[in-house]
Amino acid sequence: MEIQLIKQTDEKLLPEHAAIVRAYLLGAIDGATDADKRAWRLFLSALASAGSGEVFNLDVTYSRQAWFHKLHFKIIGAFFESQQSFDKLDQFRNWLKIGAGFVNWVDDTPIPKSISYTECSELEMREFHGKCVEFLRTQHAQSFLWPAVTPKIAEQCVESLLLPFEEF
């Protein structure tokens, strides 16, 4: 995710406020390594010495959480095993990505995006997962996955598959 910051004012903090901000930004938040700590301090120094109107661009990435990735695949596996429409897991996953809107459009054709660690951030993965669950709860998805059952039974199937994972 890219964030653009613009320094809004040249107004200086009162010394007592500056001490609180400094203590927080150098105590509660800090670099993971010595090099990261130096880079963080250089960034904060650049912010402090910048003039009004100066622009900073940040490229922020969130580390992927392996446990969440695995949880997502457990849920997908449970749905794949119980559904009646797909023979191949990769087809089911692509259908789910399209249904959740996790696609790039090329000439009016949806191309499913990758959820690999290198191409999908933690925030994107969590958003994608939430949209998958929303999509699976739609009558459209349920009637496609379980065409031989009533809508009520299909809905109950979805909820029973999601129930073990609800706390996450």
Image (spheres, rainbow, N blue to C red):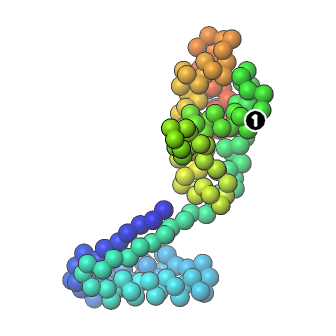
Q: Position of residue 153 (x, y in %)?
A: 63, 14
The correct choice, above or below, for 116 with respect to 161 in the image is below
Residue 90 drawn at (x, y percent): 73, 38
Closer to us: 104 or 17 = 104
Q: Which image quadrant is residue 148 in?
A: top right
Residue drawn at point x = 61 percent, y = 18 percent: 143
Residue 73 occupies quadrant? top right
**What secondary structure is marked by label 1?**
helix
Nearest the camera: 88 or 158?
88
Choose between 98 and 21: the one closer to the eye: 98
Q: Residue at x 59, y 42 (%)?
A: 111
Question: Which three-letter amino acid code belongs to the residue tagged 1?
Answer: Leu
- On the question of residue 130 being in view, the answer is no
Q: Tell me the quarter of the image containing the C terminus.
A: top right
Give the class, few, some or many, for how many residues have Cα within 10 Å of label 1's Cα (few <14, many ≥20): few
Q: Is residue 93 left or right of residue 17?
A: right
Closest to the observer, 130 or 15: 130
The residue under label 1 is 89
Residue 111: tell me if it is visible.
yes
For the point 67% across and 44% down, the residue is 72
**Vertical comparison of 141 with 149: above or below:** below
Q: Is residue 57 left or right of residue 137?
A: left
Question: Which residue is at 56% across, 39% downward?
Answer: 110
**Residue 121 in picture, x, y percent from top left:** 58, 58
